[in-house]
Amino acid sequence: MSPVRRIAITGLGAISAFGTGVAPFWDALTSGRSGVRRLRDQPFIAAQAVDFNPSLLVPSDRLELLDRFTQLGLAAAREAMADAALTPDLFLPEDAGVSIGTALGGAETYEDQYLRIHKGQRVHPLSIPRLMHNAAAGQISMMAGFRGPTLSYSTACAAGSHAIGEAAEIIRAGRAKLMLAGGADAPIVSGVMKAWESLRVLAPEPAMGPSTACRPFSKDRQGLVVGEGAGVLVLEDWDHAVRRGARILAELAGYGATADAGHITQPGLDAPARAMRLAMAQAGVEPAQVDYINAHGTATRLNDSTETAVIKAVLGPHAYKVAISATKSMHGHAMGASGALELIATIMTLRHQIIPPTAHYTEADPECDLDYVPNAARPASVSVALSNSFGFGGLNAVLAVRRV
Amino acid sequence: MTDDVETLVFELLSKRAKVVHPSISRSVSLAELGIDSLGGLELIFALEDHFKISIPDDTTQEVKTAGDIIDAIHRLAPRPN
């Protein structure tokens, strides 16, 4: 039998409504600050990466080839590589791959080109390489010079988590020593926003302003708030990381992926629970050992009550003791980037022993009766944590991380 | 019209060149300027828009140098008068 390979997380990169970098992201989350604002040019609220400046990233003539989701992904990947102190002499390019999740791919490019058609203009010749869902994965592999397995996963709101979990499996299988893995999405374009609006799951703007619109697990929750961004992590074969003297941030200890095979949008109970159990089993973790769960927590009525029931089914009585928070209350629902951003938040929780809160929580809901760490970050001893992602299509991904 | 086309093509080429070239002439190839196949597509798109012409696929495949582009435009553009 081949040895069981462990997965080290050695680098993080995040672009979010709070700006470029993991530092401003973590600072905002631990202060309970919301990134939700009213959009300048559209009648919506969203958690937009307003400060992101792609021209700092690549020369302007190359930007023409990059949809916004790819720009966000490249920026996060670059930060993660620098964070992991990766240099080309450390490994063979064939041993390094890329795994990036995205729900919507090049949404902005689709929209721009349809607008051109409606104005009687021709479609730009670089539209296909811009809008394809694997554009971010491909561009990141080019930027990094990685020539190993390079893939993109499109599993709606779970895409980032699936991309990370599958990247870990690629390393465990010995197909790569190192993977840049995460998610990127830029869905804040008018067609996509209107489509979400039509689905009637968007939170309205509260009278006091947009910042408190997303209230996961709170009785008065009214829906999700769309966000955007990218999260990318460096995953590494544990022994490889140790040999090169890398700073190991956490262990990616488990991953579970399941499908509801039920309804295209309504979340199930059994399959998400099974995903949590699979992740815990791979990590060798019993229910009582789970200290923190970064919830999928979208703030839709159905997700939050269902997720609460799922956590109870998996953890039993320990469900009432575990700390749970939904950071989407602050960074919004960044679609395919969510799982990656939330895993980064979870790793930072392990590193700093501080649990970011569920912000804007006002009132307990009898259907959501667990400890959601309301409104204020909490110092706590956290050794094992889970990050849940449940996507439309009934596609579930759960990641388990362990403190080092 | 000859001079206008040539001037504009040279201008577009120098703007899109990825490799610095001391002087662009008819004999300079797109490859020498670092313009790859996608860059070539963008160039054709811009030329079609500017001259209100449609450059057929087989022509785009034949075009290798600045001179080829200029000749193609002359062939395809409606003559003045």
Image (tube, helix red, strand yellow):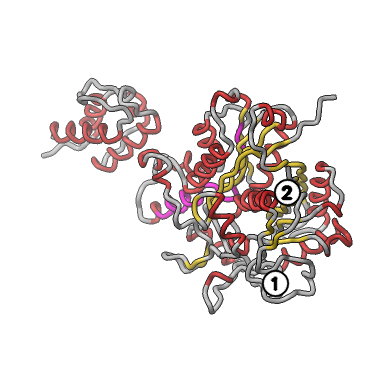
**Image position of B17 (left or right of A13):** left
SS under mark 2: strand
Q: Nearer the viewer, residue A247 or A89?
A: A247
Q: Position of residue A141 (x, y in %)?
A: 54, 33
Q: Which part of the image, by quadrant, shows the N terminus of chain A?
A: top right
Q: Which residues are magenta?
A: A97-115
How packed mark 1 is, by other alpha carbons closer than 10 Å (few <14, some 14-19, many 20 or more), is many
Q: Which part of the image, by quadrant, shows the C terminus of chain A?
A: top right
Q: Nearer the viewer, residue A161 or A9?
A: A9
Q: Position of residue A84 (x, y in %)?
A: 59, 37
Can you identify the residue that label 1 sits on? Answer: A218
Image disc number at residue A397: 2
**Image position of A47 (left or right of A385):** left
Q: Give the residue displayed 86% in from the left and 54% down from the top.
A: A288
Q: Give the residue displayed 34% in from the left and 32% down from the top.
A: B56
Kindly report which numbered mark, 1 or 2, lies closer to the viewer in this rendering: 1
Q: Position of residue A351 (x, y in %)?
A: 67, 49
The quarter of the displayed image where residue B74 is located: top left
Position of residue A220 relative to residue B57, above or below, is: below
Q: Position of residue B49 (x, y in %)?
A: 28, 43
**Image position of A122 (left or right of A26):** left
* Residue located farthest toward the right when viewing the structure as drawn: A317
What amino acid is labelled 1 in the image? Answer: Ser
SS under mark 1: loop
Chain at tag 1: A
Position of residue B58 relative to residue A226, above or below, is: above
How packed mark 2 is, by other alpha carbons closer than 10 Å (few <14, some 14-19, many 20 or more), is many
